[in-house]
Image: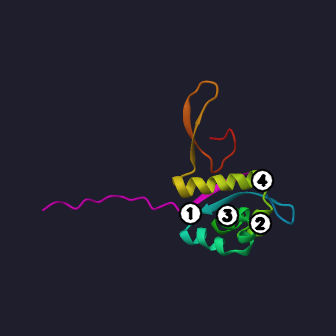
Amino acid sequence: MAAARTETVAPMRTEFNFELPRGYVDDAGVVHRTGAMRLATARDELVPLRDDRVRENSAYLTVVLLARVVTRIGTVTDVHAGVVENLFASDLAFLQDMYRRINSEGHTRAAVRCPECGHGFGVDVSGGRLGGS
């Protein structure tokens, strides 16, 4: 009789932390830079297609979709389209790229190459200060 094989399976990662390049400024003037984004479901990608704002302007799809999957920005836990609309363009681009990375590639790592020596290595683009370890 063969012995049963026991494998340790790591739990699936469904939420990813991030640090915005500039930060969301709330109504009180407080800057929020850290946050979390969860993996998108099929529903997350389908529901915005029925949204009238998206039907009138297809570019608004990004706003509605990010509002569904960003679970927190700083202490703001009610992330809705109005919050996403008020992000700086660089932060919106950052979240769009992060969404693409975690939902199509499954991670937040990017392959980069040093422009001086040509050495290739990976970095985690989800957050952390520049120059930090």
Q: Main secondary structure of the magenta part?
A: loop
The local secondary structure at tag 4 comes to helix
Report the disc number at residue 107.
none
Is residue 11 found left or right of 85 in the rendered image? left
Q: Looking at the figure, which quarter contains the N terminus? A: bottom left
Indicate the amino acid at tag 3.
Leu
Residue at label 3? 66
**CA gap, disc 4 and disc 1:** 22 Å
The local secondary structure at tag 3 comes to helix
Say if mark 4 contacts mark 1, CB within 8 Å: no
Indicate the amino acid at tag 1.
Leu
Number of numbered discs present?
Answer: 4
Point out the tag, 4 or 1, that comes first from the N-terminus.
1
**CA gap, disc 3 and disc 1:** 11 Å
Q: How many residues crowd around disc 3 within 10 Å: few (fewer than 14), some, or many (20 or more)?
A: many
Q: How many residues crowd around disc 1 within 10 Å: few (fewer than 14), some, or many (20 or more)?
A: some
Q: Looking at the image, which residue is at 74% across and 53% down?
A: 91
Report the disc number at residue 39.
1
Q: Position of residue 40 (x, y in %)?
A: 57, 65
Report the disc number at residue 89.
4
Q: Looking at the image, which residue is at 60% across and 68% down?
A: 45
Point out the tag, 2 or 3, that comes first from the N-terminus.
3
The range drawn in magenta is: 1-21
Point out the tag, 4 or 3, that comes first from the N-terminus.
3
